[in-house]
Amino acid sequence: MRDLRELDRYRVTDPAALTFTGGWAGDGRCGAFTIPSPLDQGMIVVQASNDEGWDHVSVSRKKRVPNWYEMKFIHKLFFRDNEVAMQLHVPDKDHINIHPHVLHLWRPHHDPIPLPPQIFV
């Protein structure tokens, strides 16, 4: 994942919005961000972290799920050009849904993500 200080122009710093973090706005490894969608300028809310061997980027819109173009846009902002990230579809028993319009990007730090043959992508 990129150094998230590169995205400080989007970082949530309003003290009222940071009550759940004790007022801490994050650092180069984590934080909350509001980013205008390249499609309709509506706000995309992003929470990013780099912990326990994983990069994790949570991406949500207020009234709908982010679409493919928005997810690609967020991937380009938060990950380096050579980094592969993935969405996971876990078994229902492991699924936790605390927001109806959120998707996630994941990247393990120590294991490469296997890719299908390039012709399939």
Image: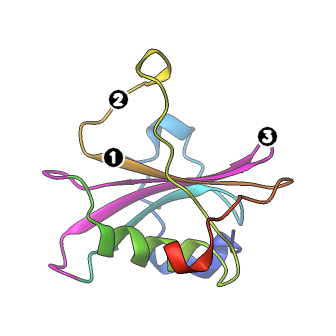
Residue displayed at 75% across by 45% down: 51
Stretch of the chain drawn in magenta: 39-64
Given the image, on which type of amino acid does mark 2 rest? Ile
SS of the residue at dot 1?
Answer: strand
**Side (left or right) of 83 relative to 70:** right
What residue does disc 1 label?
Answer: 102
| SS majority, magenta | strand
For label 2, the crowd category at 10 Å Cα-Cα, with few meaning under 14, some 14 to 19 and many 20 or more, is few
The circle drawn on residue 98 is: 2
What residue does disc 3 label?
Answer: 52
For label 3, the crowd category at 10 Å Cα-Cα, with few meaning under 14, some 14 to 19 and many 20 or more, is few
Q: Are marks 1 and 3 in contact (CB under 8 Å)?
A: no
- 59 above or below 5? above
The circle drawn on residue 26 is: none
- The picture places residue 28, in percent across and down from the top left corner, at 71, 66
Given the image, on which type of amino acid does mark 1 rest? Val
**Side (left or right) of 13 relative to 61:** right
Q: Please tell me which of labels 1 and 3 falls first in the chain.
A: 3
Residue 43 visible in image: yes
Q: How far separated are the C-alphas under marks 1 and 2? A: 9 Å
